[in-house]
Image (cartoon, rainbow, N blue to C red):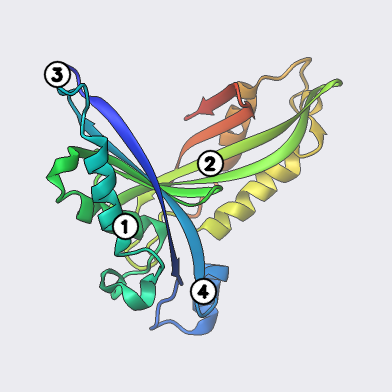
C-alpha cells in the first residue's frame, strides 16, 4: 500500500530577538534590522507538521489523530509563551530564527515514534512568512517563503489583487540562522516586482493583447533569480483568485 501524508496544524505563542552578542550595535542592526530591537518581539506561530506512513487497514488512519495532537501539544508547551533567547537553552549558541526553531522542533518530534515518520515541518511566523524543513533536504537546509501583494490590470475591465509568494531555498547560515536576508529580499521584490507591476496594466508591460498569471509568474522569476543575497530562488507562486493560482520554478 502506498504511503500517505497527513498534516496537523497547531498554534503557539512565543517571543524572540535576533542578536549576536559579539557584534556591535551597528552590525546587528545592519544584519537583522527590526528583529534586533530590544527587548524582544512576539509571534503567534502556526506550525504544520506532516507525517508519512501507510494507512492502517484496521483503523483506516496513518496515525491516531488524538495521539498526534497530544504529542504535539506536549512538545509545544515547552515553548509556549516563552522568550526563546532567555528561557530556552536550545538557543544559547544559535539565533532563534524561524529556521532554527523549526529545526529544534523537528529534533524533539523526531523522537516521538508514535506519530509516524516526520516528513516536513512548516512554521509560520505570521501569515506572510514561513520557514520549512524537510526530511528529504536534511536539517541544515530550509526554505523560506515570503508573501507580497500588489494590484494590476489584466484588461480594461479586470483588475486583480495579486498575492505573490517567493520561496528561497538554501543552507541555514550557522552565524545568522537564516537562509536569506529577509530585509534584502523585501527590497529586491519591492524594486523588481511591486514597483513595476503595482497599479499597472499588464498588457502594456508585456506589450501583449493578453497576459496570463503563468506569464506573470515567469517574469517575476526572471526579475528576481539573479538578485538574491543568499540562497537560491526555488519557486514563485502567484494567486490570482481563490480558485486560480500559478507556479513557476525555472
Looking at marks 4 and 3 on the same chain, the residue that comes earlier in the sequence is marked by: 4
For label 1, the residue is 76
SS under mark 3: loop
Q: CA distance from mark 2 to mark 4?
A: 24 Å
Q: CA distance from mark 4 to mark 1?
A: 24 Å
Query: In front: mark 2 or mark 1?
Result: 1
Please report contact status of discs 2 and 4: CB closer than 8 Å, yes or no.
no
For label 3, the residue is 57
SS under mark 2: strand
Please report contact status of discs 3 and 2: CB closer than 8 Å, yes or no.
no
Viewer-side residue, 77 vs 125: 77
Q: Is residue 234 left or right of residue 137?
A: right
Please report contact status of discs 4 and 1: CB closer than 8 Å, yes or no.
no
- Where residue 119 sits, quadrant-wise, is top left
Percent across and percent down for residue 226 are 53, 43
Percent across and percent down for residue 196 are 74, 40
Q: Mark 4 packing: few (<14 Cα in 10 Å), some, or many (20+)?
A: some
Q: CA distance from mark 2 to mark 1?
A: 28 Å
Percent across and percent down for residue 44 are 49, 57
Looking at marks 3 and 2 on the same chain, the residue that comes earlier in the sequence is marked by: 3
Name the residue at 74% across, 45% down.
Answer: 195
Q: Is residue 114 left or right of residue 191?
A: left
Amino acid at each position: 500500500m502506498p504511503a500517505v501524508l497527513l498534516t496537523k496544524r497547531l498554534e503557539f505563542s512565543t517571543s524572540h530577538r535576533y542578536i549576536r552578542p559579539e557584534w556591535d550595535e551597528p552590525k546587528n542592526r545592519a544584519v537583522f534590522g527590526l528583529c534586533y530591537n530590544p527587548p524582544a518581539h512576539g509571534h503567534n506561530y502556526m506550525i504544520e507538521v506532516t507525517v508519512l506512513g501507510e494507512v492502517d487497514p484496521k483503523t483506516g488512519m496513518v496515525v491516531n489523530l488524538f495521539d498526534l495532537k497530544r504529542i504535539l501539544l506536549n512538545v509545544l508547551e515547552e515553548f509556549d509563551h516563552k522568550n526563546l533567547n532567555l528561557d530556552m537553552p536550545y538557543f544559547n549558541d544559535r539565533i532563534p530564527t524561524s529556521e532554527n526553531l523549526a529545526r529544534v522542533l523537528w529534533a524533539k518530534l523526531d523522537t516521538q515514534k508514535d506519530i509516524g515518520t516526520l516528513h516536513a515541518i512548516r512554521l509560520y511566523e505570521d501569515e506572510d512568512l514561513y520557514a520549512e524543513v524537510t526530511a528529504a533536504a536534511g536539517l541544515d537546509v530550509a526554505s523560506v517563503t515570503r508573501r507580497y501583494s500588489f494590484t494590476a490590470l489584466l484588461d480594461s475591465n479586470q483588475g486583480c489583487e495579486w498575492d505573490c509568494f517567493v520561496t528561497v531555498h538554501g543552507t541555514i547560515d550557522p552565524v545568522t540562522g537564516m537562509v536569506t536576508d529577509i530585509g534584502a529580499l523585501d527590497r529586491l521584490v519591492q524594486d523588481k516586482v511591486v514597483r513595476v507591476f503595482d497599479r499597472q496594466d499588464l498588457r502594456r508591460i508585456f506589450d501583449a493583447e493578453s497576459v496570463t498569471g503563468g506569464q506573470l509568474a515567469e517574469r517575476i522569476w526572471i526579475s528576481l533569480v539573479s538578485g538574491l543575497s543568499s540562497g537560491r530562488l526555488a519557486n514563485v507562486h502567484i494567486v490570482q483568485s481563490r480558485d486560480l493560482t500559478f507556479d513557476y520554478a525555472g
